[in-house]
Amino acid sequence: MQTPKIIELGRGPTIEGTRITVFDVLYYMKAGRSRDYIATMLGLSSLQVKLAQDYIEAHQSEIDVAYAKNDARVRQGNPAWVEERLKQNRARFDAFVAQCQEEKQHAGHNGGS
């Protein structure tokens, strides 16, 4: 097995061959989870988690800044235009579900004819 590496793909330090960033691992670390638990939850090997943990320790100050910046962005919530689009999409989805249920009921009433 090739030794895993941390690479930069433009969305944060990532475990090579995965879409898992060190921030994903850090989330579980902050929750007090064990390496084996983190590996299981993220579909990683214990070695990959250890690599991420070592990277976090070696780059602690920059990881803390980036994590805090991302956390602040998440706490702000979505911009108004995104919330409006989500609301519109939800309305279309609800209408689609209602239409499907109506068609199913109609088919059930005409199934024996």
Image (cartoon, rainbow, N blue to C red):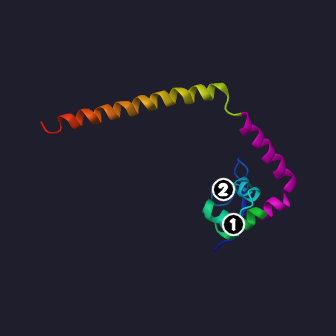
Q: Total number of numbered labels?
A: 2
Mark 1 residue type: Gln
Number of the label disc, if any, that sits on residue 48: 1
Which quadrant of the figure contains the C terminus? Answer: top left
In this view, which residue lies farthest toward the bottom?
Answer: 1
Q: Position of residue 93 (x, y in %)?
A: 45, 32
Which quadrant of the figure contains the N terminus? Answer: bottom right
Residue 60 falls in which quadrant of the image? bottom right
Q: Main secondary structure of the magenta part?
A: helix
Closer to the camera in the image, 5 or 36: 36
Q: Which residues are magenta?
A: 54-76
Number of the label disc, if any, that sits on residue 23: none
The residue drawn where x is 67% and y is 60% is 16
The residue drawn where x is 73% and y is 34% is 76
Drawn side of residue 50 relative to residue 102, left or right: right
The residue drawn where x is 20% and y is 34% is 109
Mark 2 residue type: Ile
In the picture of the structure, the residue carrying the numbered disc 2 is 20
The residue drawn where x is 73% and y is 53% is 23
Q: Position of residue 97 (x, y in %)?
A: 39, 34
Earlier along the polypeptide chain: callout 2 or callout 1?
Answer: 2
Placement of 50 over or under 104, stated as above or below: below
In this view, which residue lies farthest toward the right?
Answer: 61
Q: Position of residue 18 (x, y in %)?
A: 63, 58
Placement of 113 over or under 51, stated as above or below: above
Instruction: Report if residue 73 lies within the magenta region.
Output: yes
Secondary structure under tag 2 reads: loop
Q: Are marks 2 and 1 in contact (CB under 8 Å)?
A: yes
Inter-mark Cα distance, 2 to 1: 10 Å
In this view, which residue lies farthest toward the left?
Answer: 113
Q: Position of residue 46 (x, y in %)?
A: 68, 70
Drawn side of residue 90 relative to residue 62, left or right: left
